Amino acid sequence: MQLSFQPIGEQKRGVCVPFGKKKTTRKENATTTMRGAFRKGGGGGVLVSGFLSWGGGAKRCSHSFVGGFVGIPKTPTSWRRGGILLRTFASSSSVESIYGRSSLNSSADERKKSLVIVESPAKAKTIENYLGKDYRVLATRGHVRDLVNKEGSVDFNNNFEMKWTATVQNAKYMREIYDACKKCDAVVLATDPDREGEAISWHVLEMLKKKKLLSGEDKKATTTTTSSSGSSSSKSKSKHVSRVTFTEVTKNAVLEAFGKPREIDLRLVDAYLARRALDYLYGFTLSGVLWRKLPNATSLSAGRVQSAALRLVVERETEVEAFVPKPYWSVQATLGGESSPDRSAFDAKLLSFEGKKISKFTIESDENAAEMVRRIKNTRAWTVKEVTEKETKRSAGPPFTTSTMQQEASKRLGFGASRCMSAAQKLYEGGSFGDGLITYPRTDGTHASKTAVSEMRKVIEGIFSKQHVPDEPRYFRKKQKNAQEAHEAIRPTSAARHPKEVGKRLGEFSDEARLYALIWARSMASQMSSATVEKIALDVHNNESEKKKEIVLRANGHRLTFEGYLAAYNVVSARRGKEDDPEDARVNKDDDGDEKNSNEDDDDEDDSSSAASTSSPGNESWLPKLNQGDSIYVAECSPSRHETAPPPRFSEGTLVKALEERGIGRPSTYASVLRALVARGYVAKNGAQLVPDSRGILVSAFLASYFSKYVEYDFTATMEDTLDDVANEQKRYTDLLTDFWTPFKSECEEVSTVEVRAVVDALDERLGMHLFGRVDEDAEEGANRKCPSCENGRLGLKPSKQGGFIGCSNYPACSFTAPLRPLKGLGDENSESAQMEAFPKSLGFMPNTNNMKEVVMKMGPYGPYVELVDHTIVVPSAEQVEDESEEEYGSEKKKTKKATQKAEKPRRVGVSNIGKKTEEVTLEDALYFLAFPIHLGEHATEAFVDEEKEINREAHCGEVTLSLGKFGYYVKFGETLASIPAKFMREELQNDPRNMTLAQAKDLIEKKRRKPDSTRTKGRFASKAAKEKLAKEKAEKKKQRAAKAKTTKTTTTKKATSKENDVNDEKETTPKRKKPLTAYFQFAKDNRENVKKENPGVSLGEASKKLGAMWKELDATTKSKYETDAKSRLEQFKREEENTVAN
């Protein structure tokens, strides 16, 4: 019900129009009586839209007026609006307004004037406090729409039109926004100022327009007004929509932004649409090619950033495998100062020997190093030749961005990217603190607001000293070309909130508290004075004046004279060593030795190895105070042998850094990309290392072979620049998509014509070194691919569900298989596991069997297993089996033979059950486990029925066996399987199941028989009875359906169906013949060898592309001949098929 009329003070005419009712001509007089207790005060009230707004009243009051009521129902009706119950009565009786609550809030108070939409709920609370009661702030919590997850969501034939759908996880938040929009007068879109934030605002605006919540067309948003003559009019008023942006959530910044509203920037929206369509077309199309060309790989996927990241990991693994360690030697000495009061010793290294400077590879052998050590020990007189002292300054880097936070959290705390972002998100939301503890954690900006910088400087002076505060505030800028800097750097929302306070609330060792301490220290350090370090170089020589006889030893050290910004890290860590220093800490000096202007610092990260250590005095390279000419003695001297190390594998932190340095992707997407690589099985984690799995290596090799342009690092980085061109109106997004899609689609179609066998051969060729290792220079060609079993076959890559394996070219005559080469560096490289395991591998023969029963380790689809091979059973070859099958096709003898082979299945046990590595499994281990099942004796049981527990066990008589299964040891008696409890195994059997007696087994069996079956009726763990019952029900339903269908058919139909079924059975039993080659594949077959001869070393993928180009350029006559021959072969094939069916 809506009521609108003038303020109450005297009798006025009003209008009462019930919702959903048509107006009638009947008018009646009525009296409205308003009763209620109000607070003291004066004033009148306004009754609007079914709500009473009362400005005051010092007493219990009532007021009546005469009004014209239209469409009043004859029976009392109730409407509930905002907690107020209104009852209307027909005739001239009063309309009583009875309040369901005593609140003084009116509709004008509850109806907010403006709705503000942001992304984060943590932001929403803060901004609503800044704006006041006239604003309601709601959060979308991320993107509200996404492309439909199916083919055709981007219509490239219709100017790249996109099909959007609302995200399920954000639906309830959008419903809240819809409801709030109905009650507001204006909508303010205040999402983030970057490309993604602009897109979210655009999506929200489109969804509100679709719901018609902005045009005033919604019935509930219609306002009814009363003219002075008493007539009513309905006026539709459109809501005002504006866009505001701010890079920092401070009161001044927010209020300033709301004072400068603007429209949605369609340039940024176009850039977003281009990126979203590009990623969709890239991923959907390329994943489809992967599914078709890599067998049994339907779960594979490709992505613009994901594929580039995978390539980085795989290429680093290739470098590790190709690395050849090189030895080198160094000489160290322990020196002491004779004039030093405490004669404390210090370490030095050999700098030059007999006038020759010692570099890394100068010392070539153990003998050479030993000779140098001998000469040094025999020299008695040593003096200080030179002491060099130099003071340097080191300044802190900027506060964290998303990527630098992930890198530091990985290195300092051992957090992966997902774990880091999860902890950061919780800190941002605030949790029990109510307000957020840090600023927005997804940012590429390094700047901080002036308010935050001022607060940090005050806190630094309070915690440390005035000396720790630089004269001028430090402001940073981002040099990265594609940086959007939509948000300020990651910092504490309040610098005064100490990490210890957060640790007490969240737990000292929680992920959130540890990450907050790192963020706090980094932010505070960015506004602190530089650290002062005094570097010392001490040269000691053997008092020889001739250069050719001089031996020089050098000791390096440093003293921390002023800790500066390092004091911030001391606060959060009681013990700080070299590993606790920030990675980007560096000596901030120019070539002239002057300190750089700290205001011009950027966020470039220098390698920590290039900076001097700033560890605490207890961990520093200590040097005594010595002067030139002081005497020195050599306490000890020894050589050390080293080997060069391969490049380190990527961790999540270093991979994020590599992606950012190359301009690949955005920092906010790195965590999801890394998560996808692990989830898809492309990459495995070995501690902190990211190691490519065989699936990942195969996928990366396939993409590099056939789509090399689209997995290049420059392609992804250049694409980011092009998206910025779209945002700057230098390029239309449809033109960008056309330039990408046209050649990309052509290449995908071309690769689709390549045979799967050709793809596998191309991968085999590309991954040769990874699979089979390098070939020695003096070895014959192909020696690394020689089959160790048949000795004349060639080893090659074979596809499988698990990613692939190595097999022999003479299969099935040779059944040799091997897993893909183990990755170098994982474990002991001197053990057999570092070499390629050859399967099958003999472990020996069972004793007392005249070498007729052999224990062999084999490789199966689920890993290695041990099998007992009985050589007394003659197993026919594959050719013999095929010949016999053809002769005995459809006969009873074939069925009997198959049944016999199934019954004679050999004993097997998985290596995983043995609990050892493949190279550690011995013959004794294998015989121990192959002994199962062990016969314990005979047992007979009576029937057992318990109706209450629904137990019905039949009587049974048979053997009792002790067996080993996937989940451990168990006792079997007929259909009863009784697991051996761990406590029983430990206490009764002394951890040896062979100690099991028949009596103990009977006891376990009886306990199992008296337990009710599993309550599960479906799935893997359902009871056997439940499964049988379900199978019977399905069979019964199937019979009923068949009987029903049978009654509806005539006798003629039955005969025809029977005859047709006989024909179909014959078709099914007849082996299918291969279709003849098409014109193009016949042409490729005829010319493939010529292409290989003309282009030695060409890969199969490139050869296929050349053949495709040759086919396109082929003259019409030759092409017509190929097509005619292919057509005639196809017709001949069809005629033969028809003859086969007729016979």
Image (cartoon, rainbow, N blue to C red):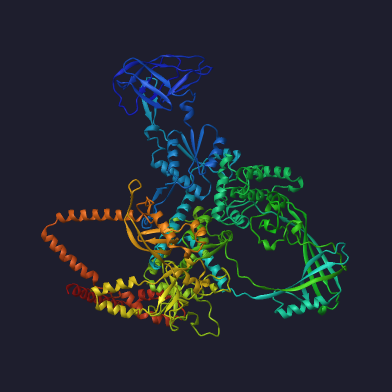
Residue 738 rendering spot, x and y as whole percentages:
42, 60
Is residue 530 toward the left or the right of residue 905 in the image? right
Where is residue 928 shown, x and y percent of the image?
47, 70
> Is residue 732 visible to the viewer in this orientation of the structure?
no
Total marks in image:
0
Between 91 and 633, the residue placed more toward the observer is: 633
* Picture residue at 56% right of the left edge, 42% below the top: 431
Front-most of residues 352 and 927: 927
Asked if 557 appears above or below 478 in the picture, the reply is below
Q: Position of residue 718 (x, y in %)?
A: 52, 61
* Residue 831, image quadrant: bottom right
Which image quarter is the N terminus in? top left
**Is residue 183 rendered to the left or right of residue 420?**
left
Relative depth, front residue between 698 and 151: 698
The residue that appears at 53% across and 84% down in the rendered structure is 779
Residue shown at the point (31%, 22%) measured from the top left: 71
Residue 936: in sight, yes or no? yes
> Can you say whether 284 is above or below 474 in the image?
below
Work out which quarter of the rendered image holds the C terminus and state it: bottom left
* Whole-percent x, y for residue 1090 in the image: 39, 82
